[in-house]
Amino acid sequence: GQQVMQIPQYQHVQEGEDFTTYCNSSTTLSNIQWYKQRPGGHPVFLIQLVKSGEVKKQKRLTFQFGEAKKNSSLHITATQTTDVGTYFCAGDTGKLIFGQGTTLQVKP
Amino acid sequence: DGGITQSPKYLFRKEGQNVTLSCEQNLNHDAMYWYRQDPGQGLRLIYYSQIVNDFQKGDIAEGYSVSREKKESFPLTVTSAQKNPTAFYLCASSMTETGLEPQHFGDGTRLSIL
C-alpha cells in the first residue's frame, strides 16, 4: 500500500547543533504537510509544500519538497530546547498519510 | 476560541466493555478524523467523515465504530472486539477532506485497560 517513511525515528542533539528529518514516499505526492507534536501534546500544523522543488523557511526551520515530489525534508538550524518534540510529515496521495515521525531530544 | 474538544482526557476500559470517546469541533469544518497513536509509531487512521451522515473506514477500523449525526460531533466507540485498545486517540478536523487542507487536532484521549 501507499506509504510515507520518515527517518530517523529518534535524534538526540546538543543544543546549538543542526537537525534534519527526511520523509520519503513510494508514490508521487500532491503536496506534503509537516506537523510538530510537543511531549504530551497534540500535532500542530507547521507548513504545507505544494510545488516541485519548493523551499520554505520559518525562522530556523527550512522545509524542502523534492523535484519528483516523492520526498521532503525539515532542517532545523542551531536547535534550541524549545524544539523538542516529534516532527511528522504527512503526504497527500488523495488522502493524507502520516509518516512515523522523528522524535527530537535536545540536550542543553 | 474555535477548536476541537476531546473528552475525557483519560479513560479506563474494563474487559468486555464498550467505551465512547467524544470529539466536538466549532470550526465549521466538513471533514473529521480519528487517529490512533502508539509509542514509536505515527498516526494511524481509524475512521474519517467527509460530511454529515457519511463516514469511511481508515486503515485500522476493526473493533471501532463511529457516527456523524451532526457536523460538530464525531464520537468514536471502542468496542470489546478491539483486543488491544490501549493507546492515545486523536480527533482532527479539516475544512474539506482533500489532502490540501491542514488538519486541526484535539488534545487527545488516553485509553487504558483496567
Image (cartoon, coloured by chain):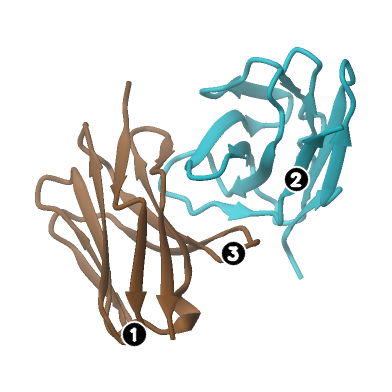
Q: Position of residue B80 (x, y in %)?
A: 81, 16
Give the labeled residue for mark 2.
B110
Among the 4 quarters of the image, the one containing residue A41? bottom right
Q: Colour of chain B?
A: cyan
Q: Earlier in the sequence, mark 3 or mark 1?
A: 3
Q: Secondary structure at mark 3?
A: loop
Q: CA distance from mark 2 to mark 1?
A: 33 Å
- Residue receiving disc 1: A59
**Distance from label 3 to label 1 (Cα)?**
22 Å
Q: Residue at x 23, y 43 (%)?
A: A24
Observer-side mark, 2 or 1, equals 2
Nearer to us: label 3 or label 1:
3
Do marks 2 and 3 share a chain?
no
Position of B6 relative to B77 (above/below): below
Quick one: B28 or B85, which is closer to the camera?
A: B85
**x then y, percent, for residue A63:** 26, 66
Residue ID for mark 3: A39
Element type at mark 2: strand
Mark 2 vs mark 3, CA separation in Å:
14 Å
Q: Secondary structure at mark 1?
A: loop
From the viewer's side, name the closer residue of B57 and A89. Answer: A89
x then y, percent, for residue B110: 75, 45
Q: Which chain is brown?
A: A
**Badge 2: residue crowd in 10 Å (few <14, some 14–19, many ≥20):** many
Looking at the rendered structure, whether the residues under marks 3 and 1 are on a common chain is answered as yes
Kind of residue at badge 1? Lys
